[in-house]
Image: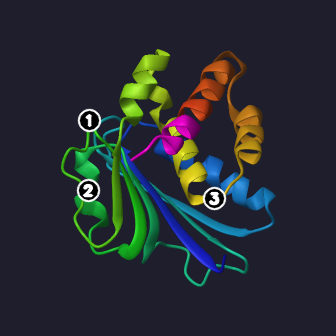
Amino acid sequence: MSQTEIRLSGAGGQGLILGARTLAECFLRQGRKVAQSQSYEPTSRGGLSRADVVVSDDVPDYPLVSALDYLVILDQCAVAASEGLIRDDALVLVDAERAPQPPQGAFRTLSLPFIARARALGNERVANIIAVSTLAEMSGLITPALLEDVVRARAPKRFLELNLEALAAGRDLAREPA
């Protein structure tokens, strides 16, 4: 891996920054160099939110995304924010329910039921963990064991079991036929 750019995007309150920090910690544990940034509208819930991770074997050339390799979109409000930044060979994962009109381009786009799976687990707030797990599984950038170690270290004890179920749901979702 020379340099890889990842964006998690959606609406405020969806745990996107937590998801990006989880990814960043995984990459740091692999010995990679990471730049993580975020942007969100002043409304804490419902406004556009995005969190970016630039990971490299060396210090990233530029700490902000400019050509996304991976993009996760959990809400329609975030679709336009990444237009023009998605590489032709990128993988774009969008929530089928909340982002029914995904970005268009040469890149590979998959509409997946992140929020519906989270709801099935009893809490929509773990859609971010399901999406991160799906991304990790589909990209091969992070092993399931490493991702689980980081989630175990970061999740509050009372939500640990739910987060572990979300990781499993994300892996399962990645393995389902598209």
Residue that badge 1 annotates: 97
* In-image side of 150 versus 52 (left or right): right
Circle 3: element type? loop
Task: Pinpoint residue 69: horizontal percent, then vertical percent.
Answer: 47, 69
Left or right of 152 in this view: 18 = left
**Residue farthest along the bottom direction in this orientation:** 61
Residue located 49% across and 18% down the image: 121
Q: Is residue 86 magenta?
A: no
**What segment carries the magenta color?**
170-178
Q: Is residue 12 left or right of residue 130?
A: left
Amino acid type assigned to the residue bearing label 3 in the image? Gly
CB atoms of marks 3 and 1 within 8 Å: no
Residue at horizontal 70%, vertical 44%?
Answer: 144
Residue 174 within the magenta-colored segment of the rendering: yes
SS for callout 1: loop
Q: Is residue 15 above or below residue 119?
A: below
Q: Which residue is mark 2?
A: 79
Task: Tell me the tag on residue 140.
Answer: 3
Q: Nearer the viewer, residue 37 or 4?
A: 4
Counting residues from the N terminus, which is met first, the one under dot 1 or under dot 2? Answer: 2
